[in-house]
């Protein structure tokens, strides 16, 4: 019998709600087959459910706990994650609560050596980072899931076993009332780093685990410093190691430091030692205020991924599929890109709009993304926690020369989580037409935002419409017959295709449902290298899969076939 804790977790800033366990009807009735079951109500399971519901797919979420997870965990959302949340129509509370930021400073032995400025310009609706505790990320997503009729969250239900055949997956579930079976056409395993499903399927991850342990401690205290990422190498109180400091909402501060080699997690979390070290960090940033500890834990860095995220009718995502170092804010931000990639593909397969091959492209694109992150995140990790005496010497040499040599400072750049380009995706087509562009947004890249004269943004206009997008650029005379034909033919596809017409003076657009953008200053056409006749074909996760300066109805139709893996 699974008896989840029914007391809310302790926190000095967050009031944990305990959600009710509900008796599952499958315990006493004939079993119905669920369309999709998501295992895990972490950020990625919840976002996947919302994305599937956006496409009209009903989802049941199984969560072993009765409450949100412990600790602030993933505290930084990237701009790409906010764009994905905007696509799900849920970004507002995140923006209201979170603290936006765009730069960081690094210090070596007390002296500032580098100011990291993350790129952004006036076309970006969001700053590169937004600090917000994971409790809020989960709370807001749960709130949206609870108002969505297509989503059923079952709290206090733990998956114990799984089996599958060609047409369905059966989950054995333990609850406070005993066990029952739930049958689903598809299961999304979003059950986190210690994924039960990954273990049950006996899947092994590839990559490496890094030596060295870090403490994460959250303290509540009033500190008058801006929202920026502070990184201290080799401070006097923690020689040879490093310390990170991040501001969060509610006067919560994240302190993250590497432990001396050989020190155990138990020793590091002993209250007296932890207290002394936190005071040393505060002293270092010239703060001597009272503080309260909210949460502390010890972690180590991994760059691990499964080689395949699709196993029959079971699809793995988020931390269940990969374990990435937190340097560069990679965990939750990578997971949001997974779910955005997976949800439309699964919908298309469920609705018979695409064959099973489309799901293979989920694995191809997202495993490649995870491998790139492992490579990039591995570099940051080796810099933060040198694995040998030689690498430490080299790292320290770079740090000390950075005090006087500007050219070395680039080596200190903290490559953060970025939007992935599916440049080699099998879903892309018309590569030669893509090569005719000198700029714009290339094959596999996500759409880029542009500030419009009306003071809103290009991606606001694309909105949360769930389907493919045809974006066409027109000249003074509006739609040409050929562009009109391309737009009208899109209505014959079995799946939704939304149309956006952009031009200096968009007089003759195709239909009432089209989004029309009057681009008087040429800002959108400049960013997209859009000339009259240019067409972009964009997937439902807003990655470009074909583009032409001049095309025809047949070419667009071929590209669509390719994009759904036909
Ligand atoms: C201690 C810690 C500190 C972290 N710190 C940072 C950080 O500073 N920065 C950062 O970017 N990332 C951090 N992360 C990583 C970040 O939290 C994850 O990347 C993110 O939570 C991944 O989301 P997810 O939904 O894939 O998995 P999770 O958030 O782990 O969610 C999985 C969910 O599945 C549920 N579940 C598990 N097994 C079962 C089962 N058998 N049946 C039903 N439900 C089940 C769990 O209860 C949980 O709710 C941290 C993670 C941990 C554990």
Image (cartoon, rainbow, N blue to C red):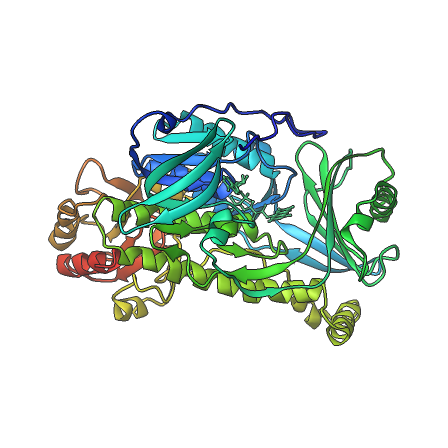
Quadrant hosting residue 434:
bottom left
Depth check: give the residue in front, 411 or 377: 377
Instruction: From the top left corner, tell me how far across and down residue 556 is, in percent.
Output: 19, 57
Depth check: give the residue in front, 149 or 553: 149
Depth check: give the residue in front, 346 or 89: 346
In this orientation, does residue 92 appear?
A: no
**Left or right: 305, with 103 as reference point:** left
Q: Which residue is drawn at 70% across and 63% down?
A: 211
Instruction: From the top left corner, tell me how far across and down residue 532 is, in percent.
Output: 24, 56
Q: Which residue is drawn at 88% across and 57% down?
A: 236
Quadrant hosting residue 226:
top right
Q: Quadrant of the C terminus?
A: bottom left
Outermost residue toward the bottom in this view: 390
Q: In this view, does 438 lie above or below 90?
A: below
Q: Which residue is drawn at 32% across and 26% down?
A: 29
In this orientation, does residue 317 appear?
A: yes
């Amino acid at each position: 019998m699974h008896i989840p804790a029914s007391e809310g977790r302790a926190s000095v800033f967050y009031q944990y709600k305990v959600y009710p366990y509900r008796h599952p009807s499958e315990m006493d009735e004939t079993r119905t087959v669920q369309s999709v079951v998501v295992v895990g109500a972490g950020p990625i399971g919840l976002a996947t459910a919302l994305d599937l519901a956006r496409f009209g797919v009903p989802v049941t979420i199984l969560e072993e706990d009765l409450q949100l997870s412990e600790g602030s965990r993933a505290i930084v959302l990237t701009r790409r994650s906010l764009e994905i949340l905007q696509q799900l129509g849920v970004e507002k509370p995140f923006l209201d609560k979170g603290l936006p930021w765009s730069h960081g400073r690094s210090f070596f032995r007390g002296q500032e050596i580098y100011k990291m400025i993350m790129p952004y310009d006036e076309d970006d609706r969001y700053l590169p980072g937004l600090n917000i505790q994971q409790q809020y990320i989960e709370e807001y997503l749960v709130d949206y899931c609870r108002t969505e009729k297509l989503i059923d969250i079952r709290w206090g239900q733990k998956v114990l076993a799984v089996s599958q055949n060609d047409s369905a997956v059966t989950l054995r579930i333990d609850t406070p009332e005993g066990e029952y079976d739930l049958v689903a056409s598809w299961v999304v395993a979003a059950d986190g780093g210690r994924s039960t499903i990954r273990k049950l399927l006996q899947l092994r991850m590839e990559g490496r685990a890094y030596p060295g342990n870090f403490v994460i401690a959250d303290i509540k205290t009033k500190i008058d410093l801006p929202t920026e990422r502070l990184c201290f190498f080799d401070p006097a109180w923690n020689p040879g190691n490093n310390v990170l400091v991040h501001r969060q909402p509610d006067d919560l501060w994240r302190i993250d430091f590497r432990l001396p080699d050989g020190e155990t997690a138990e020793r590091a979390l002993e209250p007296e030692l932890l207290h002394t070290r936190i005071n040393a960090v505060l002293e270092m940033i010239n703060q001597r205020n009272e503080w309260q500890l909210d949460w502390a834990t010890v972690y180590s860095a991994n760059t691990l991924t499964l080689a395949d995220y699709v196993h029959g009718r079971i699809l793995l995502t988020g931390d269940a599929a990969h374990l990435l170092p937190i340097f560069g804010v990679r965990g939750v931000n990578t997971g949001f890109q997974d779910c955005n990639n997976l949800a439309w593909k699964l919908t298309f397969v469920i609705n018979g709009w695409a064959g099973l091959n489309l799901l293979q492209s989920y694995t191809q694109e997202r495993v490649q993304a995870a491998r790139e992150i492992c490579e990039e995140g591995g570099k940051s990790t080796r810099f933060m926690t040198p694995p040998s005496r030689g690498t430490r010497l080299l790292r320290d040499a770079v740090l000390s020369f950075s005090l006087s040599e500007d050219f070395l400072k680039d080596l200190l750049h903290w490559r953060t989580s970025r939007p992935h380009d599916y440049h080699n995706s099998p879903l892309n087509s018309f590569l030669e037409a893509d090569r005719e562009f000198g700029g714009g947004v290339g094959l596999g890249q996500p759409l880029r935002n542009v500030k419009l004269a009306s003071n809103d943004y290009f991606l606001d206009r694309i909105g949360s419409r769930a389907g493919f997008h045809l974006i066409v650029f027109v000249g003074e005379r509006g739609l040409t017959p050929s562009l009109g034909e391309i737009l009208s033919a899109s209505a014959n596809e079995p799946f939704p295709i939304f149309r956006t017409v952009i031009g200096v003076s968009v007089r003759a657009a195709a239909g009432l449902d089209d989004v029309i953008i009057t681009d008087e200053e040429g800002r959108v056409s400049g960013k997209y290298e859009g000339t009259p006749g240019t067409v972009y074909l964009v997937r439902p996760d807003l990655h470009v899969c074909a583009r032409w300066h001049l095309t025809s109805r047949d070419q667009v139709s071929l590209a669509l076939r390719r994009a759904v893996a036909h």
